[in-house]
Image (spheres, coloured by chain):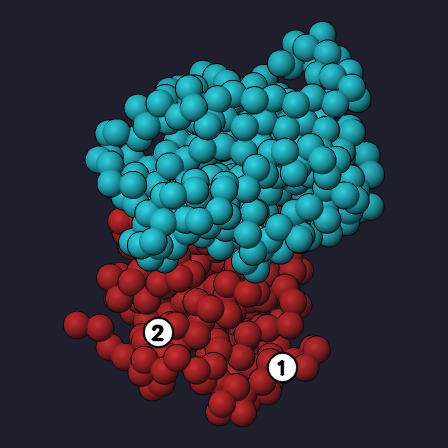
Chain colours: A red, B cyan
Amino acid sequence: MATLGPSHYSPYPVAVYENILPPPPGKALLLTEVVDEEVAMREAAKAMLTRENPTIFPGPQVIYAWNEEAKEKARLIRELAEVLGAKIIPMVDYRPKYPKIDPEKEINPNHPNLTIWHNNIKACIFVGVHCHYANVALKIIRAETDCFTIALCSNAGHEDAMITLRDQHSEELKKFIEIAKEVKKEVK
Amino acid sequence: MSINIFKINEELKEFIPQEVIDLEEKATWGNPKRGVMDLPYAKELLEEHSLCAGCPESMAFRYILASLPNPEDTIIVNSTGCTSLVFPHIALHTVHSLFGNQNAVATGIKRTLEWRFPDKVKDVVVLAGDGATVDIGLDCTLQSFFRQEKITTICFDNEVYANTGGQESGTTVQGHVFKMAPKGKQWPKVPMWQLAIDSGCHYVVRMSVSSPKKVEQVVKKAIYVAREVGPTYLHLYTPCILEIGLNSDDALMEMRDKDKERFKFFEYVSPQAEEVIAKKKEEGLL
């Protein structure tokens, strides 16, 4: 049976209703607090290393080789998944799936809760998902699951994620991987 | 935008569902000679859809999407109606506009693309039903023709507002009775193809979608003419089998019947369009 999140089936943008806003440039959001990027990265790595079935959800911006940055990010995401011991389940595009998706193989922004429930995912990273669909998916996950969400956003971040890192590009991903390696040694 | 947006990063390929890999490897990208004859062999840009079983609109979609000469650089603009149920499933860029303003939105997209990518060919194709094209959106449709916008407009004419229960539309035939039009329509069908000619379209066709090869030919001609000359318009009969009381397997015969009547093949080509078509024939693209 699915476990609901604190917002239950709320149709509202709950994070904003709780006065949670995206972090300012150079900072990150950790639950309700604005913190330094490194602090958020450590907590994100800790969540992924200690919770059940950690999973990375790469979106179209990193799945497809549309520029050099995307190619580099894909390589880094693969490395990050190995460091965190996380599964990779792609969000290949935003088309609805009929009659239904295969939740073991993909996630869809219109019903991301199905993939999270099916795989009992308790921590996840969104990376390379276009912001408008990341917003939709993160709101649904926040409302309908108890999954700890981490958004690695290349723009302004997502207040509906439990941890939001903004302006994340290849350099920042490399930094995150190094921090994840350190945290991995600590939690063992 | 580039064709690379369909190429999957090697590092992540093992996690990608096979149908998406097929879309990269087996769909017909970068080949202007693609057409309906590829349908049995190539990965289609539309496979699953949410239209009724046997709906002629789904046939029209398959033929049109298989015929686009430049799918990787084509933007499709759609509007409210049965067709809008299909667009989320298409593996191309689509924009859903408000009910009726699809040609205005397409105008903006086309002009912006010409400004942003002056050295690239970008096709903008409007796909909308008869309600959006002829009734609610007639103003925006005709105004885009008057302005000579270089877009292709394709109207799926099912002669009724089908997914709202069967109200008469501008293209309903005089005398036809529907569930929500019990007295029968009192005015003649709007001859949209004629309005398109009078409003400045350079290539206009009226037909049903009973013949896939013919659909391919007119779609390609319409897009090539729109690229170089100005607006083009295709008026396609895609009957709503539910609203006219037919079974799923009756649609093709219904269209073939109407091929001999009010949807008899009609084609208008302006002198400028004729030049473009002749040139494309020489190049082996038609």
Front-most of residues B76 and B201: B201
Mark 1 secondary-structure assignment:
loop
Q: Amino acid at mark 1?
A: Pro
Circle 1 residues within 10 Å: few <14, some 14–19, many ≥20: many
Compared with B215, B132 (above or below) is below
Residue at the image point whose x is 49% and y is 55% from the top: B80
First of labels 2, 1 by sequence position: 1
Q: Which residue is mark 1?
A: A23
Residue B66 position, x and y percent, is: 49, 27
Quarter of the image with the N terminus of chain A in it: bottom left
Residue A147, which numbered label?
2
Residue at the image point whose x is 57% and y is 47% from the top: B133
Chain holding disc 1: A
Residue B104 position, x and y percent, is: 68, 52
Task: Report which quarter residue B96 is drawn in.
Answer: bottom right
Residue at the image point whose x is 50% and y is 65% from the top: A134
Distance CA(mark 2)–CA(mark 1): 21 Å
Compared with B88, B262 (above or below) is above
> Can the viewer see residue B73 in this picture?
no
Residue B173 position, x and y percent, is: 43, 40
Residue B240 position, x and y percent, is: 34, 41
Residue A103, which numbered label?
none
